[in-house]
């Protein structure tokens, strides 16, 4: 069950996340320029409806189609989505998430059937007409089948909310309200169910709790704050702005994509809203009239005299509960593989079964007999990629392959003449953007990735039937060491700490030694938050992001050992090597670390037995 939820969440994330900027743009425009916004403007407000009804669903359908069927699948998915949109006045996000992948799948299957059967010179004609015909048929199918089915499903949810309200089961309404909101039924539920009933109550009692069930900004705020703390990459960086729009502007729709990226987190807002409704019921909370939009400002303006404590408490409790549950779920599911990784793994398996190189997520394919350059890429290009390159270089050499250049680089600067890129799975999509013609191999463990041996085996098998290529010129030696690793920066026997504390300890040594400015240390923590600095074999290599690389004064390395081990995500780390590098002076030391820590047992033995003098001599090549 967990695996199915993760897979579903990955696919939804792949459709929604590339378009989150469009959602935020729509949220800003709506919050500022709708009639109830901060700067009402009829002309600009004219964009709000079309963006919600057409632009955002079509973008999702386009992206979903592209994920399944490439560029042709993207266009077919967009056409199919338009049919679903035309079938109803309701916002068709769910329809887009069905039509997009369906369009990509149909065009992909058509291409597979036609492979090898298209006469030379007719490829473009067949490609264009296939997209047009299949897209048109799917658009018609969506009007009469997919759109109405989606409308029917959302209608069932809307009726379910009404049943719970009519039977006095207020807290349980959140069980249906929150999923229904994510289907963009929030306005239908609020104004179609709660507002009529709440208005009648307010005429008698001066207030109604029903006005706050859907409009309470607490559950959405808690979810977005959880993404700010426990999210990753783009979701984390965009959640802050979304939280402001949702809480202050009252545009609840802004947090719906964050739920769709990982459906399990709907439990956060759901239970948060239940807790909020319970508190409001206990304290006698409610509004004098409907709050529209559901912002904290509108909620306070509609609060009757004497009701501020109850309403603020209901909002705050809903936020806190939603935050705690969502943060827990994000942390639990946070190590979920990316869509790009899943695609790359499927492609690699398919290629391996045919005895050839796998295509990258961008569609490139590489014959291993033609490989002359392999690049290891990481965010900054100074630490994990350098160590991974050394390890693979050694494995290729042991296998008798000496004509392949193995180098390392930042993921944003991958050379265009390389044929294979090896990178952390969370950087795979950036690697494709940097060099779409290379095969991308995503890994999770730079020091002990099984993909290394698989690649070496593949290259040996591929070259056994081909004439031996001339040996590549030997790479120039690294510059002589000059204070890269000093004895004072080798700290042994450290007590277990958190990963962040270990990173800060390395950073302090670097600052004190004049290697970096103080601003480099937050960049090291940011790098860990993007993805783990633990690279396998009980080794971690703290270093900064590309953004803080200008804060490096000179190349330097610090070494700290933790014999009892640090719990570093899913890994145990005992050897921590902090890196600041302006050039390649540190590569010899990293190569020696790779050699000395080639498996977990070797790292453990090194940490337990080596003295400061031993490590100094070993890593500086003095013995």
Image (cartoon, rainbow, N blue to C red):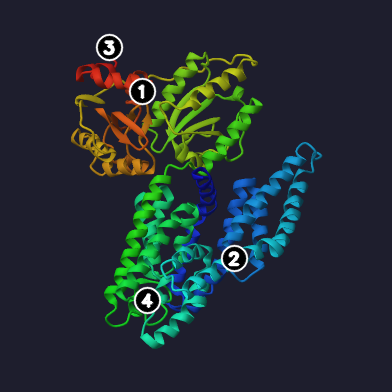
**Closest to the observer: 173 or 555?**
173
Q: Residue furthest front?
A: 167
Q: CA distance from mark 4 to mark 3?
A: 72 Å
Give the residue at mark 4. Answer: 298
Could you say which quadrant of the image residue 49 lies in? bottom right
Image point 55% across, 24% down: which residue?
372
The answer to whether residue 395 is above or below residue 321 is above
Relative image position of residue 102 (x, y in whole percent): 66, 52
Label 4: which secondary element: helix
| Residue behind mark 1 | 600
In this view, the mark in front (4 or 2): 4
The residue closer to the viewer here, 419 or 105, is 105
Nearest-to-viewer mark from 4 and 3:
4
Q: Badges 4 and 3: C-beta atoms under 8 Å apart?
A: no
Q: Earlier in the sequence, mark 4 or mark 3?
A: 4
Asked if labels 1 and 2 touch by Cβ distance under 8 angstroms, the answer is: no
| Residue receiving disc 2 | 54
Question: Does residue 207 appear anywhere in the picture?
Answer: yes
Residue 327 rendering spot, x and y as whole percentages: 36, 52
Dot 3 or dot 2: first in sequence order is 2
Q: Secondary structure at mark 1?
A: helix
Q: Of the residues tagged 3 and 2, which is closer to the observer? A: 2
Classify 10 Å Cα crowding around label 3: few (below 14), some (14-19), many (20 and above).
few
Q: Describe residue 512's horizontal placement relative to residue 65 as left or right.
A: left
- Locate the C terminus by quadrant: top left
């Amino acid at each position: 069950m967990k695996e199915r939820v993760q897979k579903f969440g990955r696919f939804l994330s792949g459709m929604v996340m590339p378009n989150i900027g469009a959602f935020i743009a729509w949220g800003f425009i709506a919050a500022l320029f709708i009639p109830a916004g901060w700067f009402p403007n009829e002309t600009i407000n004219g964009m709000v409806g079309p963006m919600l009804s057409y632009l955002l669903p079509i973008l999702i359908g386009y992206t979903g189609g592209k994920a399944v069927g490439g560029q042709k699948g993207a266009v077919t998915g967009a056409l199919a989505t338009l049919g679903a949109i035309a079938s109803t006045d309701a916002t068709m996000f769910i329809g887009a998430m069905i039509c997009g992948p369906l369009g990509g799948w149909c065009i992909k299957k058509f291409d597979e059937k036609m492979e090898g059967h298209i006469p030379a010179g007719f490829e473009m004609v067949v490609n264009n007409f296939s997209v047009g015909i299949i897209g048109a048929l799917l658009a018609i199918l969506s009007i009469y089948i997919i759109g109405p089915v989606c409308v029917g499903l959302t209608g069932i949810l809307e009726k379910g909310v009404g049943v719970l309200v009519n039977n006095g089961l207020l807290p349980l309404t959140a069980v249906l309200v929150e999923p229904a909101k994510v289907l963009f039924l929030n306005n239908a539920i609020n104004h179609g169910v709660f507002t009529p009933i709440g208005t009648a109550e307010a005429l008698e009692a001066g207030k109604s709790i029903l006005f706050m069930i859907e409009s309470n900004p607490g559950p959405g705020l808690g979810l977005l704050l959880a993404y700010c703390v426990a999210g990753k990459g783009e979701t984390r960086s965009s959640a802050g702005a979304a939280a402001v729009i949702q809480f202050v502007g009252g545009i609840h729709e802004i947090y719906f994509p964050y739920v769709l990226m990982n459906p399990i987190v709907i439990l956060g807002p759901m239970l948060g809203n239940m807790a909020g409704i319970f508190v409001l019921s206990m304290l006698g909370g409610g509004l004098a009239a409907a709050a529209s939009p559901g912002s904290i400002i509108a909620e306070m303006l509609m609060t009757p005299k004497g009701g501020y404590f109850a309403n603020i408490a209901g909002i705050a409790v809903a936020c806190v509960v939603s935050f705690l549950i969502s943060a827990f779920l994000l942390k639990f599911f946070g190590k979920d593989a990316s869509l790009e990784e899943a695609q790359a793994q499927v492609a690699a398996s398919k290629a391996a079964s045919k005895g050839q190189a796998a295509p990258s997520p961008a569609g490139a394919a590489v014959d291993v007999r033609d490989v002359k350059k392999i690049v290891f890429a990481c965010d900054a290009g100074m630490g994990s990629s350098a160590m991974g390159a050394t390890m693979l270089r050694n494995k290729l050499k042991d296998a008798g392959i000496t004509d392949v250049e193995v180098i390392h680089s930042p993921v944003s600067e991958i050379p265009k003449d390389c044929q294979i890129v090896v990178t952390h799975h969370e950087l795979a999509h950036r690697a494709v953007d940097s060099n779409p013609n290379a095969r991308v191999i995503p890994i999770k463990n730079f020091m002990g990735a099984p993909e290394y041996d698989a690649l070496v085996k593949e290259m040996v098998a591929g070259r056994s039937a081909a004439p031996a290529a001339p040996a590549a010129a030997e790479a120039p030696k690294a510059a002589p060491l000059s204070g890269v690793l000093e004895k004072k920066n080798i700290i042994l026997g450290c007590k277990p700490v958190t990963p962040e504390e270990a990173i800060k300890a390395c950073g302090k040594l670097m600052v004190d030694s004049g290697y970096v400015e103080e601003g480099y240390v937050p960049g090291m923590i940011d790098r860990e938050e993007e993805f783990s600095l633990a690279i396998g074999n009980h080794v971690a290599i703290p270093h900064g992001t590309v953004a803080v690389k200008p804060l490096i004064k000179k190349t330097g390395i610090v070494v700290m050992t933790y014999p009892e081990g640090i719990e570093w995500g899913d890994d145990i780390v005992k050897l921590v090597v902090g890196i600041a590098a302006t050039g390649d002076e540190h590569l010899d030391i990293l190569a020696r670390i790779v050699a000395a820590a080639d498996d977990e047992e070797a790292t453990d033995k090194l940490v337990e037995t080596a003295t400061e003098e031993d490590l100094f001599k070993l890593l500086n090549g003095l013995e």
